[in-house]
Image (cartoon, rainbow, N blue to C red):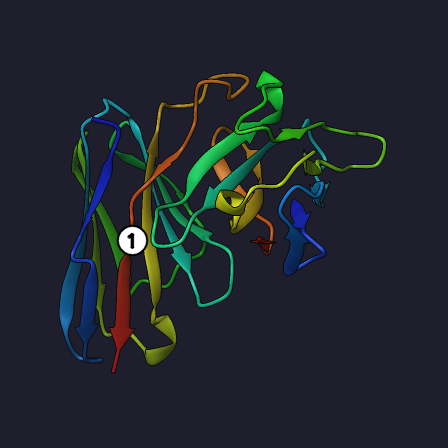
């Protein structure tokens, strides 16, 4: 069975500080992992996916199969990054299993 | 148009009522999904439609009845719900995944906040 774990419910950092949101997964197949973000009063939207290895809004995430992790990182947090972040694993196409979510608060 | 539109935004219903949630997209996506999100919890998959046919039912109780009348519309019919069914119901759509899912970004609607009294 697949499982996605985000150990931190809340992460609070100051503006300009580095950010790392942790995500670990368990999945017997070849994983496809995503980060989704939900800004206040907005819909859930894709932030980035491991397969495209892109950087969006300064965020990056590297899939580490040895550690079964897909941590989200940004070197310098901005106030507008404050949001709810979900790590998600796609199984059999695009059926998503979400982690519990981490609320990121960036303080001025 | 890259939006998934859900109506209504809010719904309060009694346990004996019958109501329907609606979802619409015009992105040409042939995969559509219903997710349920309880307060302070992540979304959980309920149903998947692929090419207007139900392909996945995640052991959802029969008081939830999905319907996909055409490639742009997805409904969720509700009957005899319980208070514990109160949640945010999210609709999503994507291209049908083939092989690696690089092109299957899921687009989510704003959700319908359902309260069962």
Q: Is residue B97 left or right of residue B51?
A: right
Question: How dense is the environment of label 1, judged by Cα within 10 Å: few (below 14), some, or many (20 and up)?
Answer: many
Closest to the observer, B4 or B21: B4
Q: Can residue A1 be seen in this view?
A: no
Q: In this view, does A31 lie above or below A13?
A: above
Residue at the limit of the structure toward the front, as seen here: A108
Q: In which quarter of the image is residue A101?
A: bottom right
Closest to the observer, A56 or B108: A56
Residue B16, horizontal then vertical, whole percent: 17, 79
Disc 1 element: loop
Closest to the observer, B15 or A36: A36
Q: Pinpoint the chain carrying mark 1.
A: B
Residue B34, horizontal then vertical, whole percent: 34, 48
Residue A2, horizontal then vertical, whole percent: 65, 44
The tally of labels here is 1
Q: Can residue B29 be seen in this view?
A: yes
Residue A19, horizontal then vertical, whole percent: 69, 43
Q: In this view, does B69 lie to the left or right of B66?
A: left
Q: Which residue is drawn at 75% across and 37% down?
A: A69
The residue carrying mark 1 is B111
Q: Is residue B40 above or below residue A8?
A: below
Q: Quadrant of residue B39?
A: bottom left
Q: Is residue A74 left or right of residue B104?
A: right
Residue at the limit of the structure toward the right, as seen here: A66
Q: Residue at x 61, y 31 (%)?
A: A59
Q: In this view, does A91 lie above or below B47?
A: above
Q: Residue at x 19, y 67 (%)?
A: B11
């Amino acid at each position: 069975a697949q499982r996605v774990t985000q150990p931190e419910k809340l992460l609070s950092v100051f503006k300009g500080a580095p950010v790392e949101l942790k995500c670990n997964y368990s999945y017997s197949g070849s994983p496809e992992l995503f980060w989704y973000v939900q800004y206040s009063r907005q819909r859930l939207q894709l932030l980035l996916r491991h397969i495209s290895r892109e950087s969006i809004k300064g965020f990056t995430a590297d899939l580490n199969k040895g550690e079964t992790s897909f941590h989200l990182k940004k070197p310098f947090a901005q106030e507008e990054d404050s949001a709810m972040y979900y790590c998600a694993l796609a199984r059999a196409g695009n059926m998503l299993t979400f982690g519990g979510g981490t609320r990121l608060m960036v303080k001025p | 148009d890259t939006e998934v539109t859900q109506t209504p935004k809010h719904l309060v219903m009694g346990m004996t009522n019958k109501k329907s949630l609606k979802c619409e997209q015009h992105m040409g996506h042939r995969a559509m999904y219903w997710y349920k999100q309880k307060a302070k919890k992540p979304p959980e998959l309920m149903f998947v439609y692929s090419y207007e046919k139900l392909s996945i039912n995640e052991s959802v109780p029969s008081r939830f009845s999905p319907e996909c009348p055409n490639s742009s519309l997805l409904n969720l019919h509700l009957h005899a719900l319980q208070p514990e069914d109160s949640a945010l119901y999210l609709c999503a759509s994507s291209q049908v995944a083939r092989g690696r899912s690089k092109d299957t970004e899921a687009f989510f609607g704003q959700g319908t906040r359902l309260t069962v009294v």
